Amino acid sequence: MVKKILLVEDNREYIDMLKTILSEHGYQVITAYNGEDGLEILKKDASSIDIIITDLHMPGISGLELAKEIFLQKITEAPIVILTTETSPQMKKEGTQAGIHHWIIKPIKKEIFLGTVDLIFKRYCQN
Amino acid sequence: MSDKKKKSSVALKMTPLILLSTLAVALIAFTLIINQDYREEVQEVEKSLEDINKIHLPPIALSLFYEDRGQVLESLKAIIKIPEIVELRVKLIDEDKDAYSLVSPNHKDMPIKERRYLGPYKKYDIIYKENSGEFKPLNMGTIHLYASLEIAKEKVNKQIFNFGIIQISQVIALGFFFFLIFQFFVAKHLKNMASYAQNLDFEDLSGPDLELKRNLPESTDELQDLTDSFNDMKRKLEKAHKQLRSYAEDLIEIVFEKTEELNQEKNNIAKLLHNMSQAVFKINSEHKIVEPISDFTKEIFGEDIIGKNIYDVMYKEIDPKSITYSDIQSVLNICFYGDDIQWFAVSHFIPETITIIKNGEKRIINSIHDPIFNEDGNLEYLLYVVEDVTEKVQQETELHKKDEELKIMKEALDFGSKRDLSKIMIQNFKRINNSINIFKNFKDLTTDDDRKSLLIEIFRDLHTIKGSSGSLDQIRDLVHSIEEGVDGIIKGHLNFSIDFLSRLELDIFKIHGLFINYLKVINNQLKINIPVESNFLDERVSDISVFENNSDWIKDLTRLENECLYFSKLCLSINETDTYEIIKKILNILHENKLDDAFLEKPGVKNTVEELLVEIKSSLKVVLQKLIEFIESSKKSSEENIPLENFNIIKNEIWNIQKNGKLDKDLFEKICNKVNGESIFNILMSFEKQISDISIELEKKTSFNVIGEDFLIPIPKAQSLKDILVHMIRNSIDHGLEKAEDRKKSGKDEVGNLVIKYSKLENTDCSFKIELSDDGFGIDTSKIYQKAVYSGLIKNEELNHQEKLNLIFHPLLSSKDDADELSGRGIGMDAVKSLIQSIGGEIKVSSTPLKGTKFEIIIP
């Protein structure tokens, strides 16, 4: 069973590191360097993507806005995970309204990160 | 009555069976006999027929020959008169019809068919034989004889009848007698047993045993066996009863005890809960602490925390600008109303150990966090379980330090001889000081080559130190790690940089600090006195006065930085790692705000930095002073002569601790105290000479034995012990043991025995018990008693054996002069007792006349 993740993150080094971690753990990773590209990919082939992991602060549309778009346009029901260095209550509120499932705080701890992704996959993607 | 019924029913069952069997046997016998009889009768009849042939037929033949019909008829009539014969027929030769036919008168009316089958039938030829034998025998005819067995049968019937009568009477008689016999031999006793059992009182089985009233005593048949087993059983039952009763009584006691124990436990648990050093509370999505909370929160935080914000309670001491603070905020903002996966993803950002200020003092807190989810699986509350571990942490740190010291002690002890250790430490410490000096000159050097040659010197020093470190692992390892870097520079692998130099300088100070540590442990704990010479530290001494005067530094960042660097190096060089960490923190703050000149003007900052530095300076001053004292004393004091075994014993103890990993503060102190202890075995054995001298002096023969496992006792205690034993041993030989001849006379071995048994008291460090016993003639209690009465000590009171013995400790009875008068103790036992009591010990005496005396001393 192919497990596909869409990674949206502007920092090239960081996204490469995440991609390596995830692929070594058995996930197929599609990358996008900004929100718009991510949206494009999703519009093309939403059904094959199981989880969307996106950074919060990006040039162009933010991770939050990306989530909002996905939610409003009903592109996919795949769980959306936000990577962020910090969160305010306001942000959390907006995110929940935008349909963000989970928040991951940077810097990530490899085992916890992978564990979280696995748990999300198990609970929300195996239907 | 059931027993009667039983008895008779057994008999009733048995009787018919017995009788039937007798009957059967009789019947079988009788049948055989009857059969035999009957056969005999039949044979009789047949014999009779034969007789007729032999006796009656020849005359008939003769009569027939002479045709005397009348005679023939008469003879035939005679034959028919024979009772067995019922019919006869004679057929003459050459005739078809019967010539004669006679029937017995009784059977005339019987039909022929019936008559002729009443018995055997025989046909004989009537043969006439001439006497002279001239003529051939002549067959005159045949006679048919029909016999009857009626008579025989009648006889047999009569016999059967008789048999029947006899049997019946036999049965009746037998049955009756059997009944009586059974009644007398068995049933009576069974009834007796049954009524005994019936009347047995199971409450009280102590009554008389069952007895069979029999005329012949001592019969050991089955009934007696049954009686014996019955009585056995009764006794066992009685015993079991008693046990059960006492068990029940014990049980009540046990239950009582257990209840007491349990109540105690409960109280302990209540105390524990009351003293539990954990606080439990929870916060809601607004990050406020809500009811209910555990009582102990007040203890930990020093105030009521309900309704307060978690940041104010737990995280006040964390800098709001720091990453930690921001992370906590992020977690708390994110996790509420998230699911368990969300909690899993971020919970690790909440710190588990934090510092709070309670009543003005710093406390270290451990906290565990547990999410509380509602039915929908969303995090509604966050549970905090909080523990004040300040003391624990302190203890652990201290213990860690002790552990480190133990390690050093072991390494030092493993090194080899004290002299070598001393020498190496002095030499290598010198080398490190040398390297520090070299570093001072570095700043003056300009060329790479010059620098390189100095580095080579430093490397040489380090290399030699490493090589000669032997078992001093930590020194060796530290030097090794530094040495590599230096080597790299020399060989050209690494690039020379200022950065490298500053790091190297710090490292060399670290080595210096490590050496100081080792020297402290070796001198203080192992009492091996290595004189410490450090130019570097001597110079720092003069700096102490500078500390107090300087306050301008705070205005100048650079100067502040330099001061901090200076202090950090100093800390390293004297192994003050905690202070070093604080200074590092200050340096970090300074680095982060380097571009901000106005930084120091910010009120909070200035105060914090100022406070910190004052703290640092004052603590460093104290540390330095102590260190100087240490150095001074190391140069002055001479070495204590500590026996090698002590070191071995200590080494083993350290090894054990390291293996089992159980170190505590007291243990550490105990080990250190042992360094200058004395082996108790040695102390005791040292009396051997004294014993031998005294024995010769007093003309006695003594053998001396010391029994026990060796351990160390502190020197003052050892001295007291020696003083005590000197008196007691003399006493024992003088007044305890007899002269050789006397001993022989009383059947003892010529050589008297003096035995000292010693043992450490359990669960104590060096409290011990000593038993001094001799096999002399003991203490004569009557003489002591007399003396006591005589000297007015007691007034004819009744004293038991032990009390009389204890009199020897009384000063009045211990006078030297009377010593030889008495055949008991004399010299200063009271002095001995006070000596023992003055160090908190006790002494007991026991004695058996003519056998010996034993003293028990306990020294705490």
Image: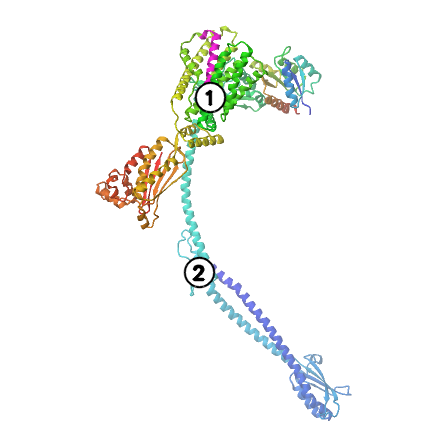
Please give left or right for residue B836 compared with residue B433 in the image.
left
Residue lying at 42% horizontally and 60% vertically, measured from the top left: B211
Quote the CA–CA distance across marks 1 and 2.
108 Å
Residue lying at 59% horizontally and 73% vertically, measured from the top left: B30
Dot 1: chain letter: B
Q: Earlier in the sequence, mark 1 or mark 2?
A: 2
**Residue at the spot of label 1:** B427
Range of magenta residues? B553-574
Residue B484 on image: x %, y %: 55, 19
Q: Amino acid at mark 2?
A: Asn
Magenta stretch, main secondary structure class: helix
Tell us which disc is closer to us: 1 or 2. 1
Residue B319 on image: x %, y %: 50, 14
Q: How many marks?
A: 2
**Residue at the spot of label 2:** B192
Give the position of the C terminus of chain B as an image quadrant. top left
